[in-house]
Image (cartoon, rainbow, N blue to C red):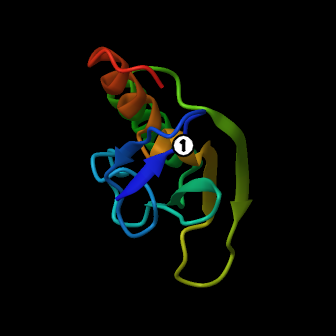
């Protein structure tokens, strides 16, 4: 559990998992994809086929925007490769705002809908 800070003494509770994102955040569907644990969180999509990795990234982004109720703040898109034997070649990362992945906009809207000022 975490709290969204505000200008006054009131706070909003957030239900977060071990890496600090909302427990309700849609997870990437492929077992090799992941939400990583850094301040601006890279959401990683790895595949030997670049269009497939990009399609999975786009699908996750659409599902997450639907869940969030607004566009996800994607700070950067990083493309790298891994040419080690047995590893997926392409590594696509969407660098996302950690507050969006924690569900802060949802919690804020729910809080405001209850009619409480922040």
- The residue depicted at 62 percent of the width and 60 percent of the height is 91
Rendering coords of residue 89 (x, y %): 61, 66
- The one nearer the camera, 72 or 31, is 72
- The residue depicted at 51 percent of the width and 59 percent of the height is 47
- The residue depicted at 27 percent of the width and 46 percent of the height is 24
Rendering coords of residue 2 (x, y %): 41, 56
User: Does 41 sit above or below residue 5?
Assistant: below
The 10 Å Cα crowd at callout 1, few under 14, some 14 to 19, many 20 or more, is few
User: Does 52 sit above or below residue 118?
Assistant: below
Single out the residue that lies furthest toward the front: 9
Single out the residue that lies furthest toward the bottom: 85
Quickly name the residue at label 1: 5
Where on the picture, by quarter, is residue 65?
top left
- The residue depicted at 54 percent of the width and 61 percent of the height is 48
User: How many dots with numbers?
Assistant: 1
Q: Secondary structure at mark 1?
A: loop
Rendering coords of residue 88 (x, y %): 54, 69
- The one nearer the camera, 10 or 69, is 10
Rendering coords of residue 34 (x, y %): 45, 61
Q: Quadrant of the N terminus?
A: bottom left
User: Does 79 sit above or below residue 33?
Assistant: above
- The one nearer the camera, 11 or 80, is 11
- The one nearer the camera, 88 or 56, is 56
């Amino acid at each position: 559990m975490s709290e969204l800070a505000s200008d006054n003494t009131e706070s909003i509770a957030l239900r977060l998992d071990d890496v600090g994102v909302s427990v309700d955040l849609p997870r990437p569907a492929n077992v090799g994809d992941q939400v990583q644990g850094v301040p601006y969180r890279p959401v990683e999509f790895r595949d030997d086929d670049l269009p497939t990795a990009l399609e999975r990234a786009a699908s996750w982004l659409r599902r997450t925007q639907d869940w969030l109720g607004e566009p996800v703040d994607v700070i950067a898109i990083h493309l790298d490769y891994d040419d080690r034997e047995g590893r997926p070649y392409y590594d696509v990362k969407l660098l996302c705002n950690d507050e969006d992945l924690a569900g802060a906009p949802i919690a804020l809207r729910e809080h405001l809908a209850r009619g409480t000022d922040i």
